[in-house]
């Protein structure tokens, strides 16, 4: 098993960026922690040295110099500092990590906001990297800094104890150092294998989490119980868990063998040193204090070296974590934004698609194939077609979430790519089929359609009335201030009906429509399956409201229910990425093409005596 690697140059750049982030977030905390790390590394060496001096003074091996009482005070103070330093470092580190986390989150958020389209957000590979950056991005700088300072502490301790050993006996000092080299090599190999295992286990962990969520989550609960899937998914979850444990077990056994051999080697070296030191002390070449400091120095060197190796391994893992974050933050905008963008004028003539071709990547088939379409200002254009015909993709292009691969989309003759996407979207209003239910209050769920209305209850209620949602929202326990979720409540709030409520699908549909009504004054109104979650009566009522809303406005209406689009000024039939038909409802029925077939098929569902479509 080989571990993931970073090229040396890239690793150095990552380290510089991560440490720079830490310094910008908490300069005082970082400098203070560096000083504390140096002190923490030297304190054990000072304790050992003072202990030697005290012992030599007590046994009469040394005379003169500092008084015994002064040495005792120095030893007590140094020991006390050694006890306090770890706690002080832990506090400083936590404060620094909090500051770093805030800065990293802000920069990651800014990087995502630079992605003005959906090109990368809908790319699975980039989405995986983004999720990893969100979950672990802050760990790169915090762990790198913490482990780097830990390495500094280990280096000072190692240097101090090794210097003591070399002064006592150069032979023993070199022997301890030589015995430490295999430990260094083996620990680096184990750290590399551990990093590789972490990546190898990601598959098992994702699958394990997937099956666990199926067993305990609400979305799948009905089918799991109705179809008796609990044992099936539970066994699959345990299979993934067993696979993960087998990988961990193999590495644990490898570590056990390596640590056992290295432990025996270290014990042999330490034992040889003890024999030499005791013999030298008996012969008068060393003092009892020298024996004590040696007994402290050998494990001190070994412990400091082990700590250094562990810190280096942790630094390597931190750099790998930071790589995800760095790549997301360095990602260029997914759509070109002109430096001298033209202002977006009010729509006067219309929006034109000229020979528009689009596919999501060269690996995917064409979704749109040479589409020519004109949306006249002040009119309603309806777009119909089977699933996969390209309707939703066309909406994404109009909102400039993507750019066409060939052809252009023009706003009163100006290519959309000449506008700033944010300015263009200010001219648009939309209700998407896959609208987002937010875990916010009812008022905020409407206000997200236009944040300028957050503090204007009148506008929010007017939009809700137009969507037919006002009565239901007013009846909530706290009216428009009621949270439309229960996920934030636990303990004493769990059974409080005032805490929050969950709306039905149809009610959520009307809340989403209210957002659209809040932006009804925009130049282009896009209605993508606006009544998909409503019953027949509610759907009829809603489309009557929408007809009033669309009157005199430029709108694009998408619906599978052809009865809802029959009053549109123009109906466009999209099939296999091409425009197959266009015209008014009566014209398309008379033409007897695909639209007439689909309309007759839907009508026959309500009239059993109607003839079958040909």
Image (cartoon, grey):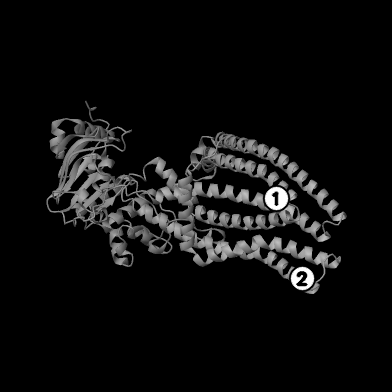
Instruction: Tell which of 25 and 413 is nearer to you.
Output: 25
Dot 2 or dot 1, earlier in sequence: 2
Instruction: Tell which of 491 and 541 is nearer to you.
Output: 491
Residue 213 x, y percent position in the rendering: 52, 43
Label 2 Cα neighbours within 10 Å, binned few <14 / some 14-19 / many ≥20: some
- Snapshot quadrant of residue 287: bottom right
Q: Is residue 4 visible?
A: yes
| Image vertical order of residue 300 relative to residue 99, above or below | above
Label 1 Cα neighbours within 10 Å, binned few <14 / some 14-19 / many ≥20: many
Identity of the residue drawn at 61% across and 62% down? 38
| Image vertical order of residue 160 relative to residue 609, above or below | below
Q: Nearer the viewer, mark 2 or mark 1?
A: 2
Residue 305 x, y percent position in the rendering: 66, 50
Picture quarter with the C terminus: top left
Instruction: Tell which of 447 and 604 is nearer to you.
Output: 447
Per the model, the C-alpha gap separating discs 2 and 1 is 27 Å
Identity of the residue drawn at 68% across and 58% down? 160
Residue 224 x, y percent position in the rendering: 52, 38
Identity of the residue drawn at 75% across and 49% down? 172
Look at the numbered disc 2 and give the secondary structure of its residue: helix
- Snapshot quadrant of residue 536: top left
Left or right, 513 with reference to 83? left
Look at the numbered disc 1 and give the secondary structure of its residue: helix
Where is mark 2, residue-wise?
Answer: 71
- Snapshot quadrant of residue 77: bottom right
Q: Is residue 500 visible?
A: no
Picture quarter with the N terminus: top right
The answer to whether the residue labelled 2 contacts the one labelled 1, judged by CB atoms less than 8 Å apart, is: no
Say the numbered circle drawn on residue 454. none
Where is mark 1, residue-wise?
Answer: 302
Residue 46 x, y percent position in the rendering: 71, 64
Left or right, 203 with reference to 595? right
């Amino acid at each position: 098993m080989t571990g993931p690697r970073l090229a040396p140059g890239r690793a150095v750049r990552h380290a510089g960026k991560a440490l720079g982030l830490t310094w910008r977030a908490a300069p005082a905390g970082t400098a203070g922690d560096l000083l504390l790390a140096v002190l923490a590394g030297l304190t054990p060496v000072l304790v050992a040295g003072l202990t030697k001096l005290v012992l030599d003074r007590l046994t009469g091996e040394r005379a003169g110099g500092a008084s015994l009482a002064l040495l005792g005070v120095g030893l007590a103070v140094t020991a006390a500092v050694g006890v306090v330093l770890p706690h002080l470092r832990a506090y400083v580190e936590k404060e620094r990590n909090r500051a770093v986390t805030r800065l990293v989150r802000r920069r990651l958020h800014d990087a995502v906001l630079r992605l003005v389209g959906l090109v990368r957000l809908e790319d699975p590979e980039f989405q995986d990297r983004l999720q990893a950056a969100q979950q672990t991005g802050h760990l790169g700088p915090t762990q790198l800094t913490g482990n780097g300072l830990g390495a500094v502490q280990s280096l000072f301790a190692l240097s101090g104890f090794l210097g003591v050993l070399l002064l006592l006996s150069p032979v023993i000092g070199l022997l301890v150092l030589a015995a430490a080299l295999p430990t260094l090599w083996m620990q680096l190999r184990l750290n590399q294998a551990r990093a590789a295992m972490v990546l190898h286990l990601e598959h098992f962990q994702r699958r394990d989490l997937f099956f666990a969520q199926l067993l305990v989550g609400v979305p799948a609960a009905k089918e799991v119980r109705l179809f008796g899937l609990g044992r099936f998914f539970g066994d699959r979850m345990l299979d993934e868990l067993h696979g993960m444990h087998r990988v961990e077990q193999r590495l644990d056994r490898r570590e056990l063998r390596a640590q056992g051999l290295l432990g025996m080697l270290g014990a042999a070296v330490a034992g040889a040193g003890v024999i030499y030191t005791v013999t030298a002390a008996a012969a008068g070449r060393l003092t009892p204090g020298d024996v004590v400091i040696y007994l402290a120095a050998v494990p001190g060197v070994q412990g400091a070296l082990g700590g250094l190796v562990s810190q280096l391994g942790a630094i390597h893992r931190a750099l790998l974590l930071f790589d995800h974050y760095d790549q997301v933050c360095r990602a260029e905008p997914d759509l070109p934004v002109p430096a001298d963008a033209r202002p977006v004028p009010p729509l006067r003539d219309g929006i034109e698609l000229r020979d528009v071709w689009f596919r999501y990547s060269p690996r995917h088939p064409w979704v749109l194939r040479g589409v020519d379409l004109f949306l006249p200002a002040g009119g309603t254009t309806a777009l119909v077609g089977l699933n996969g015909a390209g309707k939703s993709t066309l909406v994404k292009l109009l909102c400039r979430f993507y750019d066409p691969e060939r052809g252009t989309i023009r706003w009163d003759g100006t290519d959309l790519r000449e506008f700033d996407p944010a300015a263009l979207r200010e001219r648009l209003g939309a209700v998407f089929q896959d609208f987002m239910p937010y875990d916010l209050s009812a008022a905020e769920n409407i206000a997200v359609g236009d944040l300028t209305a957050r503090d204007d209850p009148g506008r929010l209620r007017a939009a809700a009335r137009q969507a037919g949602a006002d009565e239901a929202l007013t009846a909530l326990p706290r009216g428009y201030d009621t949270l439309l979720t229960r996920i934030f409540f636990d303990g004493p709030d769990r059974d409080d009906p005032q805490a929050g409520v969950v709306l039905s699908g149809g009610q959520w549909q009307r809340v989403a429509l209210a957002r659209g009504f809040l932006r009804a004054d925009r130049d282009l109104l896009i209605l993508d399956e606006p009544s998909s979650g409503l019953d027949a009566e509610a759907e009829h009522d809603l489309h009557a409201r929408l007809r009033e809303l669309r009157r005199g406005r430029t709108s694009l209406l998408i619906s599978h229910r052809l009865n809802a689009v029959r009053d549109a000024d123009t109906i466009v039939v999209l099939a296999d990425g091409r425009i197959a038909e266009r015209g008014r409802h009566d014209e398309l029925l008379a033409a007897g093409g695909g639209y007439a077939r689909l309309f007759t098929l839907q009508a026959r569902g309500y009239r059993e005596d109607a003839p079958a479509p040909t």
